Every structure is written in C-alpha cells, then in structure tokens.
Amino acid sequence: MKFCRLVPSYSESEREKAFDDLVESFREKETLVLKNKKLAALDLNISMDSIMPVSIRKNTIPVITIHWAMNNGVIDFETLDMLEDSFFETFSAESDEKAFQLFNALEIYLDKRLSSPTWRENKDPNVTLWEYVESQCHN
C-alpha cells in the first residue's frame, strides 16, 4: 500500500521500474544482514605477532590496523564500509586524527591488495594470512 501511495502518477513502466528497484533494495538488505551475521560469527583470532607491517608508496600500514582488518574479515571495501563505525570506535581513543590516518592506511593497503594480484602474490608479506582470512569469509 505504501508503495502505491508513493507512485500514484507514475506511468505503468515507471511503476514497474520503481517496484523492481524496491525489490532489489530488499534483496541487498537481506544480503547485508546475512553478511553481518557471518562476520559476527567469525572467530579468526589471528596473532598480531604473525603480521608484518606493509609499505606502499611511502605509506606504512601498521600491524595493529592489519590485525583489526584480518580479525574482522575485511577482505573488500564493502566490508570495510560496513565496519567503518567499529573501526573508529576501536581506534579513536587516542585521537580522531590518528584514527583517520590508520583508516586511510588501511584503505591504501586494501586497494593495493584488490587492484594488483601480482603485488598481492609477490610482495604482500601477509599473503598467507589473508588467504586464510578469505577462506574463512567465503565459507
């Protein structure tokens, strides 16, 4: 009923398009809920001692940031976006500026990992750990 009230003067094709968009948004929401449940169930417990810092274009991605990403199953930007508030809750205690720097460093690292498979395989010192994290996220 609500939907019909929102599109009273639309043509039939416009209503069909709006309805398809509404259905798609429900599917996306459902997928997001399932992904959140899956992430909440992850119990990776990766040791910080097993992680190496990474340098990319004069940026050093600290171990603590990589550790947070791995243990939270952050294998893509969609997941990072979903967990952005959690990241800032975790890292803003010291200062908001520091948290933004860490978040930016993580984005640089994630971008490099996703956009350059050759770099990921040959130069990422944490490739084996990431393979484990990815395998757990795709179960």
Image (tube, helix red, strand yellow):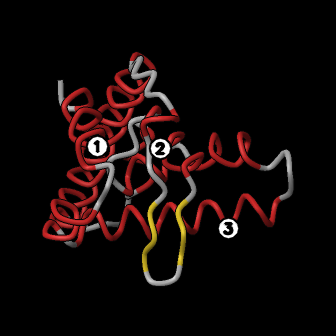
According to the image, label 3 marks what residue? 101
Mark 2 residue element: helix
Q: Disc 1 and disc 3: Cα gap in Å?
A: 22 Å
In the rendered view, would you say 135 is above or below 111? above
Residue 121, how many percent across, how many down? Answer: 16, 60
Q: Earlier in the sequence, mark 2 or mark 3?
A: 2
The three-letter amino acid code for the residue at tag 1 is Trp
Residue 9, how many percent across, how many down? Answer: 36, 66
Drawn side of residue 60 relative to residue 27, left or right: right
Residue sitting at 28 percent across and 43 percent down?
A: 130
Number of other residues with Cα within 10 Å of mark 2, as a class: few under 14, some 14 to 19, many 20 or more: many
In the rendered view, would you say 70 is above or below 78? above
Q: Earlier in the sequence, mark 1 or mark 3?
A: 3
Residue 137, how many percent across, how many down? Answer: 26, 31
Mark 1 residue element: helix
According to the image, label 2 marks what residue? 69
Furthest-bottom residue in view?
A: 57
Q: Look at the numbered discs 1 and 3 and tell me whether their residues touch, using CB distance below 8 Å.
A: no
Mark 3 residue element: helix
According to the image, label 1 marks what residue? 130
Q: Look at the numbered discs 2 and 3 and tell me whether their residues touch, using CB distance below 8 Å.
A: no
Query: In the picture, residue 86 is in which quadrant?
Result: top right
Number of other residues with Cα within 10 Å of mark 3, as a class: few under 14, some 14 to 19, many 20 or more: few
Number of other residues with Cα within 10 Å of mark 1, as a class: few under 14, some 14 to 19, many 20 or more: many
138 or 49, which lies in front?
49
The three-letter amino acid code for the residue at tag 2 is Ala
State the quadrant of the C terminus.
top left
